[in-house]
Image (cartoon, rainbow, N blue to C red):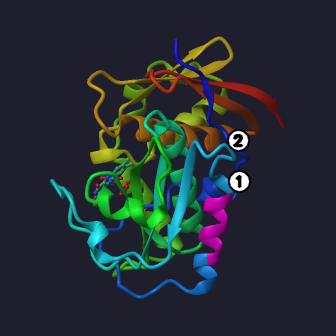
Amino acid sequence: MSRETTISRDLETAWFEAIPARISSRRFTGEALTSAELDRLEQTCERLSTPSGSARAILIRTAPPEVFTGLVGSYGRIEGAPSCVALVGADDAGHEIGYIGEAIVLDATIGDIESCWIALAFDAERVGPLVGLADGERVHGILALGHATETPSFSERLGRAAMRARKRLPLEKIAPGHEGWPAWAQEAIVAARLAPTGANRQPCRFHMDGDALVMTTAPKPYWTAPLDRGITMLHAELGAAHAGVSGRWTANPAGDLARFVPQSAS
Ligand SMILES: Cc1cc2nc3c(=O)[nH]c(=O)nc-3n(C[C@H](O)[C@H](O)[C@H](O)COP(=O)(O)O)c2cc1C
């Protein structure tokens, strides 16, 4: 049986407020981020990387444009992003990397920096040497960062949240029977529903098991599913915290199941 990992970190309550304001931006102005913006991103990366090094986030202050190549698929190409964060870890670190990567995305959103998760449209061969990979590590994805060509204000983006929510599966589909759940768990799944996922596939499903909120993955998992799960775990945890309940996620890296066990209610 493979190990269970505790995913959770110390949360910033402000990240919750950024959830409805975040969107994926693919066209950036090319203008460099300021030193203050970069320093803040770097501190966030350092704080969230695991002390053991199992999941690391490394800021690339000046990102060569060639890193934003690779399979584009149905996505638009990434243009003009001045910086990026490389998300690095062992093969089975996908949940942790999704969790810390999304925390960086939400923290950047608060600082009016736009972003896009990229797990396909980047060149891992070019990113690896820029961050110095240890044995057994690989680049799971990168976060494109910068100022978007069209930058809506924070409040304009909040206004768009309802529109974006329409692109997500109905709550009843991802959390059947949620009406009877405790308020904190309902808040958790509302936040989880707004999580970005690779190609917007929304693989996560939820149910209650006693006091615990359990997350499973929808049938037909696919290659970004571990990252998507980690991202969704952070969103759910922020929702629970907003409702006054803190707790811990544990997940089996090889499996498709994670449990959030409440530890305290305020
Ligand atoms: C793990 C992950 C990988 C992604 N990879 C790419 C990518 O390679 N290229 C891209 O343009 N967008 C990528 N995206 C962005 C998703 O397409 C986007 O989050 C999703 O369609 C939902 O839209 P939203 O982020 O605006 O809410 C990725 C998102 C996630 C979470």
Marks 2 and 1 close (CB-CB < 8 Å):
yes
- The answer to whether 122 appears left or right of 210 in the picture is left
Label 2 Cα neighbours within 10 Å, binned few <14 / some 14-19 / many ≥20: many
Over which residues does the magenta segment extend?
A: 39-46
Q: CA distance from mark 2 to mark 1?
A: 8 Å
* In front of the other: 167 or 101: 101
Tell me, yes or no, if residue 116 can be seen here: no
Residue ID for mark 1: 13
The residue shown at (46%, 33%) is 92
Residue 45 belongs to magenta span: yes
Residue 196 belongs to magenta span: no
Mark sitting earlier along the chain (2/1): 1
Position in image of residue 4 (x %, y %)? 60, 22
- The answer to whether 210 appears left or right of 2 in the picture is right
Residue ID for mark 2: 241
Task: Please tell me in which quadrant of the rendered image residue 121 appears.
Answer: bottom left
